[in-house]
Amino acid sequence: MQQALLDHLRKITEEEQRILDGVAEVDKDLYTSGKDFTVDSAKMLSEGKLIAVRTHTRFVHFPSHRHNFIEVLYVCQGQLTNIIGGKEVVLRQGELLFLNQFTRHEILPAGEEDIAINFMILPEFFDVAYTMAGNNNVLADFLVNVLRQDDERGEYLHFKVAEVLQIQNLLENMIYSLVTGKGDQNRINQTTMGLIFLYLLESVQYAEMRLPNQYENMISMTTLDYIEQQYRTATLTELCEQLHLPMHVLSKMIRKNTGFNFKELLQRKRLSKAAELMCETDLPISDVIAAVGYENGSYFHRVFKERYNMTPRAFRVANKKSEKVRL
């Protein structure tokens, strides 16, 4: 980050000066009008604005609170420790934390050199980012749906992307734009967030989530649906591209959640479909082999026999007589 911008963000605010002068607690009236400590967008965002930024208040424990908007924390320098659902989440320089609406958390005291930015964002701000991510992007759907929920399940997304230079540059541009407040930058900032979003989708292997099982189940169901629909031509490489996941990460998830690797799942589907075609049609076996995506007939015969303990021809004869198909 440019030194001039960092120096600007490092300046002691009026609130921080009062804390240094002996005020031991956060002034809740700056953040909310209600008894429950819910940080209110009406106090934090100017009318008509979808996004605003402020530097995180240092030198004091920020007590347990919620917010009726999406909060994104970014650490410019040092680190920041959140407590979310009893779990300590340490945010280090260059990392991002997306907090869902009404996620309750607290923040341990930050030192003078711990410089963090709070992005305060209304959900509709992400509409441009969602459009930029494109249709049929299941990971984008998942992330956007997490951000749009408005309950208190404590969902968050922690992206450890300090080494992703594109994300760091885009964040610096957005912070500069919002801090200086020059002109109406809303559309530019939405587009910038869209670009950040696209890079985050490519960097999901660096993400930690509050509900990892939900995410992994979504990935597994998407994998099974992809094989079901595309078994003739399906490849792990294509699925990795669709999900924006490295091959080793996706392979590990598939094995963990299904008990099989991708090749085994695909083979089971192809053999099951081949058995169905042999028993329900009069297609020559060579045509059945091609119809389910195999190019090597001898390989098909070998794996089919391993699965069903008989040759394809014997399987067809046995099951056509009994009219029972063992898939």
Image (cartoon, rainbow, N blue to C red):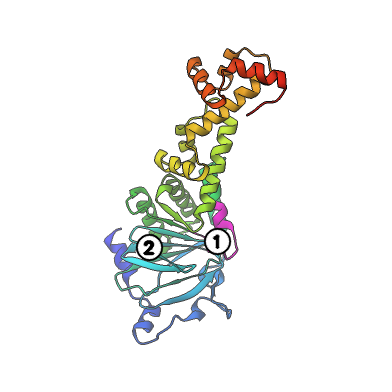
Q: Which residue is at a point 43% across and 48% down the rendered structure image?
A: 204
- 133, 255: nearer the viewer: 255
Where does the image place residue 106, in percent across and percent down from the top left? 45, 72
Q: Position of residue 278 (x, y in %)?
A: 64, 19
Tag 1's secondary structure?
A: loop
Between 175 and 130, which is closer to the camera in this rendering? 130
Residue under label 2: 91
Tell me the mark number nearer the camera, choosing from 1 and 2.
2
The N terminus: image quadrant: bottom left
Based on the picture, tell me whether residue 147 belongs to the magenta stretch: yes
284 or 134: nearer the eye? 284
**Identity, as a three-letter code, of the amino acid under mark 1:** Leu
Residue 320 appears in the figure: yes
Query: Considering only vertical position in the picture, is 90 above or below 279?
Result: below
Q: From what the image shows, is residue 16 above or below residue 102?
A: below
Residue 206 at x, y percent in the picture? 39, 51
* Quarter location, residue 114: bottom left
Spatial CA span between label 1 and label 2: 22 Å
- Residue 26 placement: quadrant: bottom left
Q: Is residue 203 magenta?
A: no
User: How many numbered discs?
Assistant: 2
Q: Which residue occupies 59% across, 33% down?
A: 228
Q: Measured along the vertical axis of the image, is residue 326 above or below residue 202?
A: above
> Mark 2 is on which residue type?
Leu
Q: Which residue is mark 1?
A: 122
What residue span does the magenta drawing correspond to?
144-156
Q: Residue at x 60, y 64 (%)?
A: 151
